[in-house]
Every structure is written in C-alpha cells, then in structure tokens.
Image (cartoon, rainbow, N blue to C red):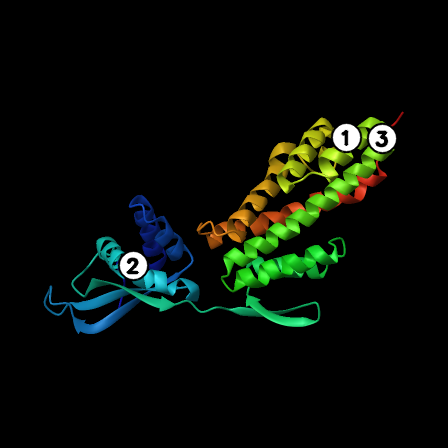
Amino acid sequence: MFIPTINEESMKITLVSLLEIEGQTELANVVKMSKIVYAPQWEFSGIVSNQRKLYVEIKVPVNLKKFALENIQILSNCCRDIYENNEDYACSGARIGTRVIVAEETEYENKVILLEKDSVYINFIKYLSGNNRVDRLQKNYLYEACTTGNQGNILAASVMLGCAAEILLIKLCEAFHIYYQNNHTEKEIENFFSKVLKAKTAYVRLDEFTKRAEIHSDLFKSFGFENIKLNFNFLDIIRQTRNDAGHPTGKKLNEDDFKTMLGNYQLSLGRYLAAIEKLPLTKINP
C-alpha cells in the first residue's frame, strides 16, 4: 500500500514557494492553478533494494500544458528536492498531466454556452443576465470579455473589458454633466462640457472627471466611493491594459491578473451604476 511521506497539498504549497524563491514566478502561477497527484510505479528506482519509482503528476490547465512541458526539468528537480524518499518509494521527478475542466451551462442573449464552473467568467455572466441596470452595449462587451477570457484569449478579452469600461466612463461623465447643469454656473457647465465630455482622449476625460469628483468627494462617498482617486484610477488601469493588448506592444498579459481585474470590475460596477443613476437627480440645497 502506497503511503506518501508528504501529502499532495503540502507538496503543491512547497513547490509553489520554492519556484517563487528561485524566480520562476510564471511556473509557480501554473502550479497554483494545477492539481497534484502522486503516481507510484512498479519499476524499481535502482537506488535502494526493492525501492520503487514515484512521479509527481502535475495536472495543469489545458492552455498551460505546453509551457509546463517546456519546463519539465525545473519542475522535476524541485519535486525531487522536496519529496522525502523512504525505503518503499523514491521520487523520480515530475510528469505533466491535464486538469479536468468542470463545465457549467448558462444562457445569455438566448445563447447557451459552457463555461468553467465557479469561474470569474461564469459568475460575471450570471450577474449580467439578471441585471437590468447595465446597458445593452456594455453588456455585449462584457459578455465577449468573459467568453474569450474563458477560452484563454486574454489579449482579446482585455480589449473587450476596456471597451466596456470606456462606455461606463462616458455614461458617468454624462450623468455628472447633468448634475453640473442642475447645480453650477453657466461657466462651470461650459468648462465641464469642453474639458470632460469633449476631451480628445479617454485619459484626459478620466483625469478631468476625477479632478471634479474629488472636489465633490462627499457626494461620491454617498454612492460608495471611499477613495475617489483610487476608485477611478482603476478605470485607468483597465484603459492602459486595453492599449497594451490592442496594439502590437509585445506585452504578455497574465490570465490571473485579468481575472482579478474582471472580478474587481464586477465588484465595483454597483458603485458606478449608482452614481450614473443618482447624479442627474441630485440637487444642492440653496
């Protein structure tokens, strides 16, 4: 009966830590998304009498299998270093397997699709399906961001998320403009129109919007924005990522980073929608 000297979860945690210490960050991220199982063999190790071989099988996501295979020697060396051999089994290195994708069926826009169960992608699509506060155009871009991201096409998914965020910013600016029309002088309204709504670039629009939002910080705090600069800087991070992905910069985008960005977008969306809905209705008491 095979009884490992180190359980599989401990092997995974230690392997990730060792790879990070050795500067193999990408490889460590692959292992984080993988499942580790031991594969004891009948073949003798040749090290100790009657001792058999043992492999650490790393079941990686399908889209990362090629990268893992290219680095099999590094993984094998680390596994041999970590595993504590005994008289029954000796670790002979790592093998690369494929992690099973557990799919869940969902429906969006009268289309039935399969996405990875409990992933950030399917959670966001479910959120969008039952949310009438998000406009149709933004929903379409977010849907594309989720479906393409689920397929591992992170460059394309980043562009789609960037488009959705740009629509959101424009709607925020339009709602804030109505607030200005209701509460500010003609000169201030005209200044807002020329510098924010008619800004030449998304960067300038967001910068000018944020300056004015900071002046009205109490108002935006009532919508859930605790740190104005930080909250709206998040939209600029998405914009920059979109620019990197949509132009031949050669920059590689990490899927984990994109998932984090998408998840944060979903968490923040309620605050942005509240501002869009309430700004036009808000009047300063005379």
Depth check, front residue: 152 or 78: 152
SS of the residue under disc 1: helix
Marks 1, 3: nearer the viewer: 1
- Amino acid type assigned to the residue bearing label 3 in the image: Asn
262 on left or right of 78: right
Comes first in the chain, label 1 or label 3: 3
Using the image, tell me which numbered label, if any, was put on residue 183. 3
What mark, if any, has residue 191 been given in the picture? 1
Marks 2 and 1, the one that precedes in the sequence: 2
Position of the C terminus, as image quadrant, is top right
Label 2 crowd (10 A; few <14 / some 14-19 / many >=20): few
Distance from Cα at disc 2 to Cα at disc 1: 57 Å
Look at the picture and state if 214 lies above or below 110: above
- The image quarter containing residue 58 is bottom left
Tell whether 254 sits left or right of 187: left
Q: Closer to the camera, 14 or 88?
A: 14
Mark 2 sits on what residue? 71
Please name the amino acid that badge 1 sits on.
Asn
SS assignment at label 3: helix
Can residue 202 be seen by looking at this rendering? yes
Residue at disc 2, secondary structure: loop
Q: Is residue 1 visible?
A: no
* Residue name at image x 11 percent, y 64 percent: 48
Q: Where is residue 218 shown, x and y percent of the image?
A: 73, 29
User: Mark 2 and mark 3 in contact (Cβ < 8 Å)?
Assistant: no
Q: CA distance from mark 1 to mark 3?
A: 14 Å
Q: Residues within 10 Å of mark 1 (few under 14, many from 20)?
A: few
